[in-house]
Amino acid sequence: MTAPQPNPDETKNEATMIASILAGQTQLFHELIRPHERAVYRMALSYMKNEADAEDVAQEAFLKAFRNLSTFRAEAKFSTWLISITLNEARNRLRRNATMPTDSIDATPEEGGTVTPALLRDWREVPSEALERAEVKQMLQRAVASLPEIYRCVFVLRDMEDLSVNETAEALCISVPSVKVRLHRARLMLQKQLVPELKSVSTTKRRWFSWS
């Protein structure tokens, strides 16, 4: 799946808004973050596992982004910077609440491993009619939520939010090879869990997952 290329006009517009916000036009912040609200919330939800906590994390991430906007450097995409803040806030909240153990994002057992694309069959090609059913979408979302953190984060950023490999690596503070290997393994885990159930739906039309 090819990630979309950055839109120069969009990047320029964001830079202009950021400059205006820092100059005192703080009301523009809502316009700045509006295109990223869904991605931030979805990333928070992938960690917190319930909507109330995810909303709290997203809200706090946006507040921290506002307070620290002057530290943003244009070398990175604004969306990537926001995702990094969201990830840090979610991890910190889980540590504070001690509600569940988290996998170490620094652990890289896959470094130096071998990626074998041939093992990845068409796990994403599932009946389109099935994907239109709310219960199947919920099943997919539960499967993603069940992935270990180090794989879930990469999958959400790459296959759900369409960040590039480099952007995902930057957001997670890991290497590009780690992104590729973790994404591959996440897809295999989902394939193993979902394909037997989804294949029970009889149809010939196929397409990529439709995430709501």
Image (cartoon, rainbow, N blue to C red):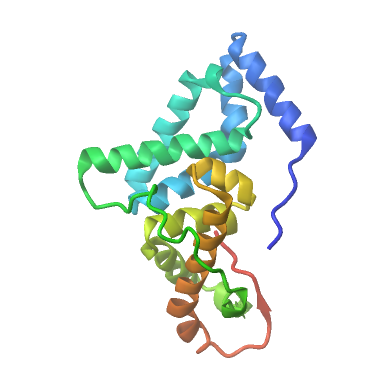
Q: Is residue 117 visible?
A: yes
- Residue that appears at 45% across and 61% down: 110
Quadrant of residue 57 within the rendered picture:
top left
29 or 188: nearer the viewer: 188
Q: Position of residue 116 (x, y in %)?
A: 58, 74
Is residue 175 left or right of 165 when viewed as pictured? left
- Residue that appears at 52% across and 35% down: 82
Residue farthest along the right direction in this orientation: 9
Is residue 149 left or right of 134 when viewed as pictured? left
User: If the image is split into quadrants, where does the N terminus sit?
Assistant: bottom right
Label count reads 0
Q: Position of residue 64 (x, y in %)?
A: 44, 25
Residue farthest along the left direction in this orientation: 98
186 or 16: nearer the viewer: 186
Q: Position of residue 205 (x, y in %)?
A: 68, 83
Q: Is residue 125 above or below residue 17?
A: below
105 or 142: nearer the viewer: 105
User: If the image is split into quadrants, where does the C terminus sit?
Assistant: bottom right
- Residue that appears at 43% across and 71% down: 139
- Residue that appears at 37% across and 52% down: 107
Q: Is residue 163 visible?
A: no
Q: Is residue 127 above or below residue 111?
A: below
Residue farthest along the top direction in this orientation: 23
Is residue 77 left or right of 59 when viewed as pictured? right
Quadrant of residue 208 within the rendered picture:
bottom right
Q: Position of residue 26 (x, y in %)?
A: 56, 15
111 or 163: nearer the viewer: 111
